[in-house]
Image (cartoon, grey):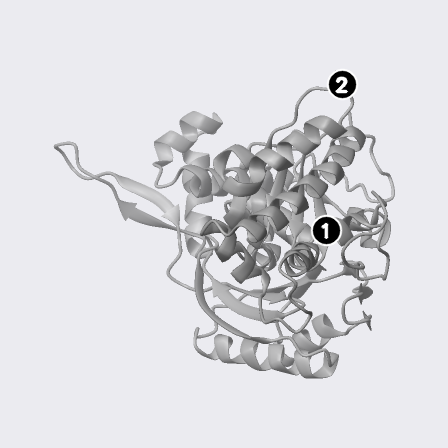
Amino acid sequence: MRRIDLKKASVARANTIRDINRQIVLNYVRELGPISRAEIARETALQRSTVSLIVDELIAHALIEEVTGESSGGRPPSLLSLRTVDAVAIGVDLGTIKTVVATSDLAGRVLNQEQFLTDPDAESTTQKIVECALRLMRTNGGTIEGIGISFPGWVDPETAHSYAPHFKWRDLPIAETLTQATALPVTIDNDANAAALAELWFGRPEIREVRDFILVLVEAGLGTGIVFDGQVYRGEGGTAGEFGHMTIGSGAPVACAAGSTECWEAFASERAALARYKKATRQNGNSDIDFTKLVDLAVRGEGSARAALKTTARYLGIGIANLIQGLAPETVIVGGPIVRAWSIIEQDLKSSVEASICRGLPSTPIIGSTLGAQPTLRGALSLVLASKFASVA
């Protein structure tokens, strides 16, 4: 049972039920479309007339469209599908190495994108993002409705206060600057939170049915996005999920973004895997190998690369075991470029979890993300798109 927060509670208005029904119908089209009006009425137990009124409204707002189904001998049926002809969102994946700016349709399909190396100078990076966004807007004839930003650090979506430890950026006014330049609403959130939101709305079907899960995002740093009861949990000031900085040992191969060699991030991030590989092969810090190349080598069977990833996976498992024991999620998802090596790391990761967790606790599924190598870009787009489908209640 959820206790009512009287400070935030709103009494039911006459249009509340109508708005809820509208979102239900829209989500049936999104999840099951192409689908007929009759099927929606049957699934929802709404009156056919009510469904027709809602459908007409959704068509008028360019959210869904009628398509012709396959004929079974008579007149082809009229079905409903999401309207995906236009780009409706811009996503900004602000990474520690590169920044990607892209458009997507209502279904979350990436249409066009630009990218550039992230400049440590905050003003320069912000200006490049503005220029990319304006170019993408011009090529889409005014159909863009909002911009989402995936940010590599702590961020409070309510106040836009933020801190990116990799760059030492504090309270970067990127959302405000983008709004002023584009006249569009801008939503910004931590990259792991954004990726978790993308899993919730656009991940594999079995995850869309899960109400409580944790997304562990492995990149240059390590972050977690927590989903409770079908929504991202951000905590006070947006600081929830900073498990990358929990202590799991000492003498890590690299320091975390805050300078510690005891954090989970220092043992289980991409940088940790690269440091292990370079030490094993006696390569110095000037080597041009990056994590993508490391995974490529491992996939091709190179021993030192595989060993570096497998050791990193074992430390990843120690942290995940702590999350499972403390939060008891239904599922844990691992996301980021490391998922390309899932067949190499899966067994080591799961064995580490089993060895680290208290005996007698129920097992928790641990799966690799299916959002590809850019879950944070999908997350940035989800910050705009999810508002279209989320419950109004």
Is residue 320 depicted above or below 192 in this figure?
above
Q: Residue placed farthest to the front in the image?
A: 282
Say whether residue 292 is left or right of residue 97: left
When asked about the image quadrant of residue 120, the answer is: bottom right
Which mark is first along the chain, 1 or 2? Answer: 1
Apparent side of residue 130 relative to residue 169 in the rendered image (left or right):
left
Residue visible at 48% across and 28% down? 44
Can residue 13 be seen at all in this image of the molecule? no
Quadrant in which the C terminus is drawn: top right
Q: Is residue 41 visible?
A: yes
Residue drawn at point x = 65 percent, y = 59 percent: 274
Q: Which residue does the image show at 76% across and 61% down from the upper left?
A: 153
Q: Position of residue 190 (x, y in %)?
A: 72, 57
Q: Between residue 306 and residue 145, name the one nearer to us.
A: 306
- The residue that label 1 is drawn on is 223
Q: Which residue type carries mark 2?
A: Arg
Coordinates of residue 2 in the picture (x, y in percent):
79, 29
Q: For the N terminus, give its image quadrant.
A: top right
Which numbered marker is on residue 359? 2
Which residue is more in the foreground, 193 or 13?
Answer: 193
Q: Inspect the image, locate mark 1, and give the three-letter code of the amino acid beneath it.
A: Gly
Element type at marker 2? loop
